[in-house]
Image: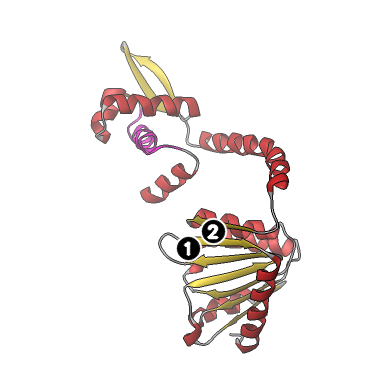
């Protein structure tokens, strides 16, 4: 669980030392910088830097006890307020960014990103196209990589938009295929084991996502009408040979 907590805090913008200091204060309560520094094993100047950052973010408060400057963690529920404020700040600038993006977009674009969050963002962006989605070469481990919570939310949003999604999984994922076929606007099949791959091809509109299940995950996003059409032709060939679970 500690590793999960570290990942979550990193994802909302906390530095490594800030996370260590905050978790220490949550565990031990009111403490001086010296006490914190000794417990977590980082130099006092670095501890003070982390404390200042946490105060600015609203994660801790400063007080005086027995003529000593001390620090205490705020209620962990306040973290939600911090995240919501960040969300609000981002939403304010999105219209400007979209307008700017329209001015620089070309007819053909290629992007390379890495990591689970990049993978999630790439999938969510497909829903904005409001086009059918075809995916092939899905390894069984992709479900664990993305997480049940994310996938449930993704499919809920997709189904509400009435976007058809067809999946071609690797052979071992028969249970997942059965599960998906119960969802509306969803079809799933699997191929023979000899066609198993660690690269997934996702096609939606003029966009092709090539997802390489390495460590970390790599995503190659191609925006090109002709390339997308070609991959869709390959998908239809595979779809004819694939079997329902």
Viewer-closest of 118 and 18: 118
On screen, residue 63 versus residue 78, left or right, reads left
On the image, numbered disc 2 is attached to which residue?
Answer: 119
Residue 106 in the image: state x and y as whole percent.
Answer: 69, 53
Is 171 positioned to the left or the right of 243 in the image? left
**From the viewer's perspective, is residue 36 above or below residue 194?**
above
Q: Residues within 10 Å of mark 2 (few under 14, many from 20)?
A: many
Asked if residue 174 is positioned above or below residue 51 in the image, the reply reads below
Q: Earlier in the sequence, mark 1 or mark 2?
A: 2
- Front-most of residues 65 and 42: 42
Within the image, what quadrant is residue 17 found in?
top left
Asked whether 154 or 62 is in front, the reply is: 154
- What residue is disc 1 on? 145
Residue 111 drawn above or below residue 204: above
Point out residue 62 in the picture as x, y percentages from the top left corner: 41, 20
Q: Are marks 1 and 2 in contact (CB under 8 Å)?
A: yes
């Amino acid at each position: 669980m500690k590793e999960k907590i570290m990942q979550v805090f990193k994802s909302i913008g906390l530095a490594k030392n800030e996370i260590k200091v905050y978790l220490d204060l949550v565990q031990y309560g009111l403490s001086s910088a010296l006490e914190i520094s000794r417990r977590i094993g980082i130099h006092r100047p670095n501890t003070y830097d982390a404390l200042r950052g946490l105060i600015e973010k609203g994660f801790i408060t400063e007080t005086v006890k027995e003529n000593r400057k001390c620090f205490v963690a705020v209620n962990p529920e306040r973290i939600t307020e911090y995240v919501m404020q960040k969300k609000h700040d981002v939403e304010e600038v999105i219209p400007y960014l979209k307008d700017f993006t329209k001015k620089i977009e070309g007819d053909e674009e290629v992007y390379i990103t890495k990591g689970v969050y990049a993978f999630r963002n790439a999938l969510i962006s497909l829903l904005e196209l409001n086009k059918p989605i075809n995916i092939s070469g899905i390894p069984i481990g992709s479900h664990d990589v993305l997480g049940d919570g994310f996938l449930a939310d993704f499919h809920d949003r997709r189904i509400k938009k009435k976007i058809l999604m067809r999946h071609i999984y690797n052979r071992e994922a028969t249970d997942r295929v059965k599960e998906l076929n119960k969802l509306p606007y969803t079809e799933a099949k699997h191929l023979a084991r000899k066609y198993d791959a660690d690269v997934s091809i996702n096609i939606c509109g003029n966009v092709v996502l090539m997802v390489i299940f390495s460590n970390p995950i790599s995503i190659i996003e191609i925006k090109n009408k002709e390339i997308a059409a070609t991959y869709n032709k390959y998908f239809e060939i595979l779809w004819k040979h694939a079997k329902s679970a």
